[in-house]
Amino acid sequence: MSTYTTEEPTQVTDAAVSTSTRLSSLDTLESEAIHIIREVVAEFERPALLFSGGKDSVVMLHLATKAFWPGKVPFPVLHVDTGHNFPEVIDFRDRTVERLGLKLVVGSVQEFIDRGELAERADGTRNPLQTVPLLDAIQRNKFDAVFGGGRRDEDKARAKERILSLRDEFGQWDPRNQRPELWNLYNGRHTVGQHVRAFPISNWTELDIWRYIERENIELPSLYYAHQREVFARDGMWRAVGEVSQPLPHEEVITKTVRYRTVGDMSCTGAVESDAYTVADVVVEVAASTLTERGATRADDRISEAAMEDRKKDGYF
Amino acid sequence: MSTETALIESGLRESTLFRFATAGSVDDGKSTLVGRLLHDSKAILADQLDAVARTSADRGFGGDKGGIDLALLTDGLRAEREQGITIDVAYRYFATDRRSFILADCPGHVQYTKNTVTGASTADAVVVLIDARKGVLEQTRRHLSVLQLLRVAHVIVAVNKIDLVDFSEDVFRAIEADVQQVARDLGIGADGISDVLVVPVSALDGDNVVDRSVRTPWYSGPALLEVLETLPAADELESHLESFRFPVQLVIRPQGALAPDAVAGGLDAEAYRDYRAYAGQITEGSVKVGDQVTVLSPGHEPRNTTVTGIDFAGRELEEAAAPQSVAIRLAEEIDIARGDTIAAAGTVADSTADLYASLCWLSPKPLREGAKVLVKHGTRTVQALVRNVSGKLDLGTFNVEEASTLELNDIGHAQLRLAAPLPVENYQRHRRTGAFLVIDPLDGNTLAAGLVKDHPGDHEEERYVI
């Protein structure tokens, strides 16, 4: 069994090409990502992988296991814990780390708030607060390369970011001063204090991620699939009722069949109404979706048109 | 078929990947063309379209018609809007039922060489825009010249704003003839690998962008998107070459540190105790189990051995081809490390420490003779000395001028002496093993894109531009 997908010739003018075997787009993206992961591991001293239990980071970890098979994944995973987690996601994170024999490093937003080094925001959202614990964990552990599951189709700031993105001592991204990225030659040279963010799945779309999850039979936290949940409407999204996400008096709580398209801070991540109970259902739903995943589910990205750009410049993922 | 059904099918079918870039200035309607491709291929989702419609209305676009400014779909960062500039290449994604596309949207007006070189280095095709009212300009010649140098497999010239010349066949044919003349001057198409196609389009109205237009009855060729859907990707072309090339990224040798999930899944730990394989991405050609290969390592004579296995995450493959990432097992226990190259036996020349190359200079810091730089080639980085700069290309006339320095956006010849020999090959024949980066050892920044040339007198490659 080879990894080729053979397409039958569809028309005569295709004959010259169709005699060949072509890689599917997923196979091509997978090989590209594995090449990047191996380059970073070969060229950096202390890489780590950002792992939130979200689908993109789960796919990243899956690609890493394939890149080094039959060996172990040769780097730790780093989770920036907002303290506003969905319990099933933390449970999934811990089981995954255990299954793969990985070291888990946690940067805790709550600890920074408790120590008075970060202030809770008026809107209660903690996604933007992740930057400080992230940079702290990178410095304390001397990570020189940090893998992220960022994709260029997510946002226009991400659309301009390099696959290897250099960050200065403050973790800042400077969009005007990026290295040109040529062929498949990645330049990860950096000076002391600088580090590199590596985005091996930059070229994947949300649909690619889901088709890959389906093809590779990858397990995800259960909240990515349709389930019954107590929710209330806020900012045009369905918010889950939870410890850190309480309805205001005028917000009516109802039980709906929902799923999550992204997983983040529980206080700003919205659910979508969905009856996609299986991965195959989700692939169909995503293919037919008329909203972007961030537009549909992230209150923090609705704050302004340049929300992601601003956070990235400050050192965000 | 309803839109929804088409989209669902496009998501479910196994498509192939195609990378292309656009080149042209704002005035040529490039942003509108990109917006049109994204819009008409349904890659723009409702929330994005709403945002663009609001901004279009705010800016009074389309007047009473309430049209939307498609160019806004590719509007960039706030930093760019505030300064009215485009910082650099933006990547966009869309899919049809045949293909997934990665579009490198390269700004044309500033630093066009830097951006075009960057976008074209990974592109299977580049779409060059020409304003039908203006025809072939010096900028068009510059773009085509860079694309020839970078050996982009397919060049598509979109003659835009064909509506503004009343869909005139005469205007189109004249431009088409000019383009083909420039291509012949440059040698595009002469090697049988690259080709040039010319398509009349109106990005604003959508003629011949996604669907064939009834307003150009004299044009019997395909619409732009049809072209993009059917051209073979560079990897498809290069996977057929006889010259298998595999730069080793790292050695996989778990020595007992096996992946717990693999062991739990039934991997025989005892059998994998001495597992040793060489991981990398095939850059060219294909390889089969049983093939004779040559291992090129610095400080060693080329060594011959046999491929005994091709592994991909627990699956044993009989055969693999560019651009697959795999791990290769070899018959002999020989010392192989990152930076070595595994190649089809009998197809490689010796490594060399004398590098003749074209350099596309991408840094504001100029190149001077005698400079010490780093050269990154495949999976190796070595020190190098710039022995001389022997000329600079005038992209408008294709002539080589005297030069002893290269500045930002210049393309020139140089000779470098490497601290250790590298298995470089001519870029015109081997796009991956002929490419390298020039890196500043002080701050690590990328200074230039390097394209390997033959040593003077080795081959008759001098008919190429540079």
Image: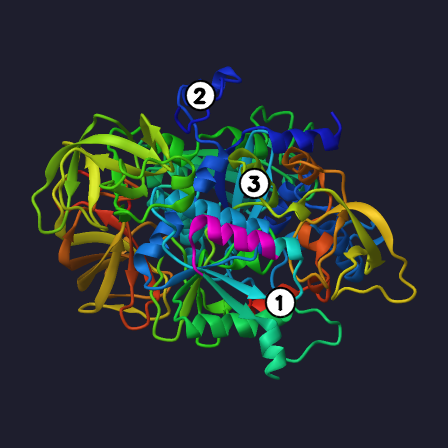
Q: Which of A124 and B176 is in front in this view?
A: A124
Q: Which of B403 and B453 is in front in this view?
A: B453
For the N terminus of chain B, which image quadrant? top right
Residue A98 is one of the magenta-drawn residues: yes
For disc 2, the marked residue is: A18
A271 is higher (above) or lower (below) than B275: below
| Picture residue at 18% right of the left edge, 59% below the top | B416
| Picture residue at 43% right of the left edge, 74% below the top | A139
B66 is higher (above) or lower (below) than A176: above
The stretch in magenta equals: A90-103
| Picture residue at 81% right of the left edge, 65% below the top | A246
Q: Distance between the residues labelled 2 and 3?
A: 23 Å
Residue B276 lies left or right of residue B153; in this view the side is: left
Q: Position of residue B373 (x, y in %)?
A: 23, 65
**Mark 1 element type:** loop
Crowdedness near tag 3: few (<14), some (14–19) or many (≥20) residues, C-alpha within 10 Å: many
Chain of the residue under the numbered disc 2 shown in the image: A
* Amino acid type, label 1: Thr
Which of the two labelled residues, at mark 1 and mark 2, occupies the earlier sequence position?
2
Magenta residues, dominant SS class = helix
For disc 1, the marked residue is: A82
Residue B130 is one of the magenta-drawn residues: no
Q: In which quarter of the image is residue B133?
A: top right
Q: Are marks 2 and 3 in contact (CB under 8 Å)?
A: no
For disc 3, the marked residue is: A208
Q: In which quarter of the image is residue A120?
A: bottom right
Q: Can residue B166 be seen in this view?
A: no
